[in-house]
Amino acid sequence: SKLVEFKDYLEEVGYSQVNKIGNIREFVVLRDQRFNNVLNNINQQMKYIDVLYPCLYALIGIIALIISYLMTVSRKMEFAIMRGLGGTKRHTFFSFFTEQVILSTVGCAFGLIIWRLFLGTVIPMHQLLILGFLICYFIGSAVSIAIMNSKIVFEILSEKD
């Protein structure tokens, strides 16, 4: 990373250069073309990663929303039964939402424990990603439960999968 500074130092001290004889008649050969090629490749890969990671994070958020929606809608018969037996909209919402929160939080905690046991430390970025996943999952659950809650029991039962 300090190759240019090193070259400047050699020039200041007086080492000879190509086609220029200095005070010190010795040459230091630096094969920096290979170094520069590798450095350029690394910089290009880092640019790709900078573009790819936000896309990956957005994809994880979308997947969390879809999974939470599918998990909730797949239980619409249970939802209709609770509502048919006299459960209020508020009661059914908090019942289903609490269940989804518990399941997703326990699942993420279990995943973190396994990660810690087999792969080592959990960096803050992993924790932030899990928090983002959970937030998207909770939003998806709340929206899907609210959509089911907005319908009457007969509509829920008459819908086809």
Image (cartoon, grey):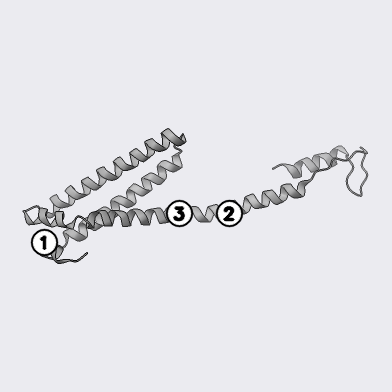
Mark 1 — residue?
153
Q: Using a 10 Å C-alpha cutoff, classify the residue at mark 3 as few (fewer than 14 neighbours), some (14 to 19) or many (20 or more).
A: few
Q: At numbered mark 2, what does the secondary structure look like: helix, strand or loop?
A: helix
Mark 2 — residue?
47
Q: Amino acid at mark 1?
A: Val
Residue lying at 46% horizontally and 38% vertically, measured from the top left = 123
Q: Is residue 87 above or below residue 156?
A: above
Q: Using a 10 Å C-alpha cutoff, classify the residue at mark 2 as few (fewer than 14 neighbours), some (14 to 19) or many (20 or more).
A: few
Mark 3 — residue?
56
Residue lying at 46% horizontally and 36% vertically, measured from the top left = 119
Determine whether label 2 and label 3 are within 8 Å by CB: no
Q: Using a 10 Å C-alpha cutoff, classify the residue at mark 1 as few (fewer than 14 neighbours), some (14 to 19) or many (20 or more).
A: some
Quarter of image, res 17: top right
Asked whether, in this view, residue 46 is left or right of residue 21, the answer is left
Q: Position of residue 151 (x, y in %)?
A: 15, 63
Query: Earlier along the polypeptide chain: callout 2 or callout 3?
Result: 2
Query: Earlier along the polypeptide chain: callout 1 or callout 2?
Result: 2
Query: Earlier along the polypeptide chain: callout 3 or callout 1?
Result: 3
Quarter of image, res 107: top left
Single out the mark in the foreground, 1 or 2.
1
Q: At numbered mark 1, what does the secondary structure look like: helix, strand or loop?
A: helix
Asked whether, in this view, residue 77 is left or right of residue 10, the answer is left
Report the quarter where the N terminus lies: top right
Q: Amino acid at mark 3?
A: Leu
Residue lying at 63% horizontally and 51% vertically, measured from the top left = 43
- Give the spatial CA distance, label 2 vs label 3: 14 Å
Q: Position of residue 92 (x, y in %)?
A: 15, 51
Quarter of image, res 44: bottom right
Q: Position of residue 120 (x, y in %)?
A: 46, 34
Report the quarter where the C terminus lies: bottom left
Q: Amino acid at mark 2?
A: Lys
